[in-house]
Amino acid sequence: RFHQVVAWGFGISILLMGSMTMLGFLTFGESSSGLVLNNYSAEDIWMSGSRIAVALSLVFSYPLAFAGCRDGLLDLLKIPTEKRTSLNLNILTIALLSVL
């Protein structure tokens, strides 16, 4: 059941993203920017709201993705959970962010 839900979730996400990408390209043609919101006027209040929503989404989802990356690295390095203290996690976080 879990695999079905995941497959449906990814399938719907792919269809939505593909549809939005296609609509953006059909609206602006070959001169379309990679970030479709940049094609709209800065005076457009709805697009300004969309830009803010995208920025908020990026800012607040980054810590979740980063924590997964950090924990995955710890798993790859086979660091036991007993050694994953707050100090060690903070040091690793600073090191990874410095590299990124």
Image (cartoon, rainbow, N blue to C red):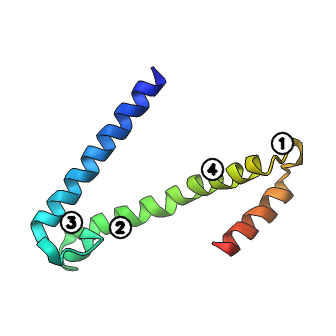
The residue at which mark 1 appears reads as: 81
Residue 90's x, y, as percent? 78, 61
- Name above or below for residue 48 compared with residue 80: below
The residue at which mark 2 appears reads as: 52
- The secondary structure type at the circle numbered 1 is helix
Quick one: label 3 or label 1, which is nearer the N terminus? 3
- Quarter of the image for the N terminus: give it: top left
Circle 4 crowding by C-alpha within 10 Å: few under 14, some 14–19, many from 20: few
- Under mark 1, the amino acid is Thr
Residue 66's x, y, as percent? 61, 57
Circle 3 crowding by C-alpha within 10 Å: few under 14, some 14–19, many from 20: few
Q: CA distance from mark 2 to mark 1?
A: 38 Å
- The secondary structure type at the circle numbered 3 is helix
Q: Are marks 2 and 1 in contact (CB under 8 Å)?
A: no
The residue at which mark 4 appears reads as: 68
Q: Quadrant of residue 24?
A: bottom left
- The secondary structure type at the circle numbered 2 is helix
Residue under the point 23% across and 59% down: 21
Q: Quadrant of residue 88?
A: bottom right
Q: CA distance from mark 4 to mark 1?
A: 15 Å
Q: CA distance from mark 3 to mark 4?
A: 33 Å
The residue at which mark 3 appears reads as: 46
Mark 3, mark 1: which one is toward the viewer?
1
Q: CA distance from mark 4 to mark 2?
A: 25 Å
Quick one: label 3 or label 4, which is nearer the N terminus? 3
Q: Are marks 3 and 4 in contact (CB under 8 Å)?
A: no
- Under mark 2, the amino acid is Ile
Q: Are marks 2 and 3 in contact (CB under 8 Å)?
A: no
Q: CA distance from mark 3 to mark 1?
A: 47 Å
